[in-house]
Image: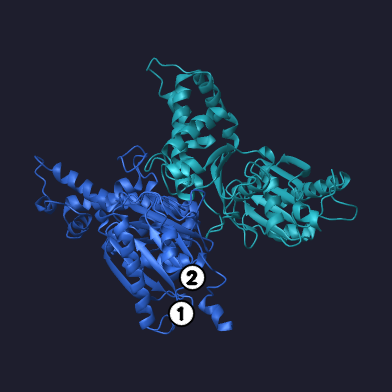
Chain colours: A cyan, B blue
Amino acid sequence: MEAARHAVLGLDIGGTKLAVGVVTPDGRVSGFLAEPTRREDGHKVTIPRLFALGREAVRIARAEGVLGPGEDIAAAGISCGGPLDAVTGVLLGPLHLPGWIDVPIVDLAAAEFRVPVVLDNDATAAAYGEYRFGAGRGTSTMVYLTISTGVGGGAVIDGRLHRGAAGNGGEYGHIAVRPGGRPGFGNRAGTLEAYCSGTAIAARATEAVAALDGTGRTSVLSALSVIRAEDVAAAARDGDEVAREIWNETIELLAVAVTDLVNILEPDLVVLGGGVTRSGALLLDPLREQVLAQAMPPAAAAVRIELAQLGDMVGVVGAGAVALDRVAPSTVPSTLTDLHV
Amino acid sequence: MEAARHAVLGLDIGGTKLAVGVVTPDGRVSGFLAEPTRREDGHKVTIPRLFALGREAVRIARAEGVLGPGEDIAAAGISCGGPLDAVTGVLLGPLHLPGWIDVPIVDLAAAEFRVPVVLDNDATAAAYGEYRFGAGRGTSTMVYLTISTGVGGGAVIDGRLHRGAAGNGGEYGHIAVRPGGRPGFGNRAGTLEAYCSGTAIAARATEAVAALDGTGRTSVLSALSVIRAEDVAAAARDGDEVAREIWNETIELLAVAVTDLVNILEPDLVVLGGGVTRSGALLLDPLREQVLAQAMPPAAAAVRIELAQLGDMVGVVGAGAVALDRVAPSTVPSTLTDLHV
């Protein structure tokens, strides 16, 4: 790769995997590395391992010529699940990392890498990554929804990453799709997450299969000892009736939330990411149809609904995008500006 | 009043009333005038009447010293219900003004007043009016919801009026509160507007009273030939059981939508305006309690929920605020900047 001045380091702390990479101002990634989080080790073991991985990414970026000789990263961005305090740079106790209480991750990373460091909610950072370097390039108002173990999201509004008064930017998993319905995580029942997360799809299918007893109906899902969301998608694609019912209800309830987001924010683009969206057209086609039919006509006419483009790299690219944009905007020119220097 | 340089004219075209006034950069209103729209006359009669009213407001502002001798308004803002095209300045066919099709209201007003003119959706303008000069002063991200004949709203996000890709900024009346429920206006059932607008509250109460026949239950509402939303509020306050059921359901469904807005946008303030909110604490107290209990804790901790402050002047002040801000920001300094000139 060609050397890119002002590249940054992206660090993504997931519940199952740590990922790192050096992100250039035009969104290329060098030295992408990932390994299991092994969260049971605790943060005192895992954070030094994350930093070692980051140093290795910088070494690779240098070897690939993305960083010039003697040149260092300009900043680092960290993406992690909440609750966290982005302003003070502290992990308050991420739900996916038991025991990581009040970890001053920004101070620790700044001491390690000796550059400015920023921290953001994983879904917020991912939204910004897709906006800058993924499916959202060229849009103005973009909503990002990630449907995975849980459901989260973020938005870029009129070109600016939305953070909101609480700093999380938005909790789309907690939109009501069947008010008073299934209990979910937290203090509200009938939420998007309670029905449409990978976990919830699997739980609903498991319940549906258990309810077949004595009805004479059958499902290929009955043969599985553990039903996962991807099993439901695969069986629905193959025409299994029970799986289709679960899948159709999932799309219908997802469409309620996406229509709400379209009516409320009038984005030009909705981007759908996360493991559940690997089902592709099986999810996207009926969802698009239902949202465009239900949304207010001017909002429906203005919006596109697309799959995310950054895949497993979204955490690293998102953390990098936030670092590029937030820490040192004046010293991190875009490549377009570079042309005129 | 003291003379205020760069005052603007606000023009509010409602379905039942026209209102005008001269708005100063610090939000004072001079020459506020209102009269019936008489929409049956058609736009060719009504628009000249609106403009004559505007000239009278300017005359009063001059008499009151808000405009200095020989000084004119710096711009004019127009607030009207949609559909309209804010960019081209054309009323496409507002739902509350039958027959007002493709009216180039901005060009007409510019020819009349010989100043720059802007047009905005009434709920969008009202949101900005409350943000600049009403309940929203000093906030950063503010959601405004108006609950009147219909339900609408708008938002200021991080200090900027949100317009969105479709230019309406948001259609909060079309948030789903009971998906698949009551048909409402438009292509979605079970919306906030279908349950909680003044029209819908009255319709639901009328149906509830009709359903009393033969049940032995009674309601004071039965004595009314036409039940209005304010009758339901008054009877609920007086302890009428049927009215209370309708009212409680209204608050519960309103809380679903407001909680969605709080979870999605994480505002520091939600402002509630429109005729239905004249019920005051009867609406605000239980709504606050339910929203704060259901919203995500960080979002709930960051938000206040308050009644609007501009009352009947919100349309004029909103149109004026948009004109002050949008047409000529560089030639319409804030009063704070004036101090340093």
Disc 1 + disc 2, Cβ < 8 Å = no
Do dots 1 and 2 share one subunit? yes
Q: For mark 2, does the 10 Å Cα neighbourhood hold few (<14), some (14 to 19), or many (20 or more) residues?
A: few
Q: Answer with left or right where residue A68 lies relative to residue A123.
A: right
Q: Quadrant of the C terminus of chain A?
A: bottom right
Asked whether residue A113 is in view, the answer is: yes
> Which of the chains bears the disc numbered 1?
B
SS label for mark 1: loop
Q: Amino acid at mark 1?
A: Glu
The answer to whether residue A226 shows anywhere in this view is no
The answer to whether residue A232 is left or right of residue A128 is left
Q: Quadrant of the N terminus of chain A?
A: top right
Which chain does the residue under circle 2 lie in?
B
Between A205 and A271, the one lying in front of the other is: A271
Q: Is residue A116 above or below residue A18?
A: below
Question: As shown in the figure, which amino acid type bears the numbered disc 2?
Answer: Gly
The relative height of residue A78 versus residue B63 in the rendered view (above or below) is above
Q: Which residue is mark 1?
A: B71
Q: Where is residue A202 shown, x and y percent of the image? A: 51, 31
Along the viewing direction, whichever of B168 and B41 lies nearer the viewer:
B41
The mark lying in front, picked from 1 and 2, is: 1
Q: Secondary structure at mark 2?
A: loop
